[in-house]
Image (spheres, rainbow, N blue to C red):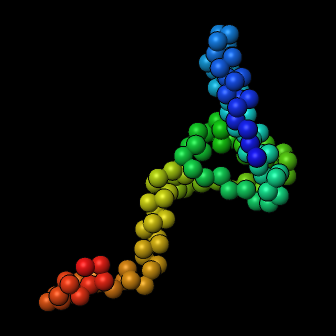
Amino acid sequence: MTDWEPMIHALLQDFQEGVPVGVIAARFHHTLAEMILRVARAVGERKVVLTGGCFQNRYLLSRVIRRLREERFQPYWHQRIPPNDGGIALGQIVAVMRSTTAVRPLVTRGADPRSLPCA
């Protein structure tokens, strides 16, 4: 769906030609935003969730949000929970808290540990 090769070649050529790093970085982020937009169009879902460590980059995040909105997509992104491993850890905690086994003690006083399912 997305071919990264042209972008990589263009970035390497810019670097070899002495294009300022800031310009190269901006082109990279703009291209990523357009790739995300292309995927959103191909999927056809108007609601687009932006998550993952790359969206800690405020420049990329704001660019993607703007482009999606310009194309009438409805972007969703992290507001209070980090989009990286911190968010995953919170989700894991919630999943454990919701599971029925999490509310039962794993070992009771005097229980034979060999009787536990994981022993």
What x and y, as percent, mark residue 14? Answer: 69, 16
The outermost residue toward the left is 110
How many callouts does the rendering have?
Answer: 0
In the displayed structure, 60 sits above or below 105; it is above
The outermost residue toward the top is 18
Q: Judge from the rendering whether residue 83 lies leftward or rightward of residue 107; answer left or right.
A: right
Task: Examine the rendering and report whether any part of residue 46 can be seen.
Answer: no
Task: Examine the rendering and report whether any part of residue 16 can be seen.
Answer: yes
**What residue lies at 18% left-to-right and 89% top-to-bottom?**
111
Of 82 and 27, nearer the camera is: 27
Quadrant (top left, top right, bottom left, bottom right) of the C terminus: bottom left
What x and y, as percent, mark residue 27? Answer: 71, 27
Of 107 and 70, nearer the camera is: 107
Q: Judge from the rendering whether residue 79 lies leftward or rightward of residue 31; answer left or right.
A: left
What x and y, as percent, mark residue 21? Answer: 61, 18
**What residue lies at 65% left-to-right and 38% top-to-bottom?**
60
Q: Judge from the rendering whether residue 95 lies leftward or rightward of residue 36; answer left or right.
A: left
In the displayed structure, 80 sits above or below 32; it is below
Residue 17 occupies quadrant: top right
**What residue lies at 14% left-to-right and 89% top-to-bottom?**
110
**What residue lies at 42% left-to-right and 68% top-to-bottom?**
93
Residue 74 occupies quadrant: bottom right
What x and y, as percent, mark residue 56? Answer: 56, 43
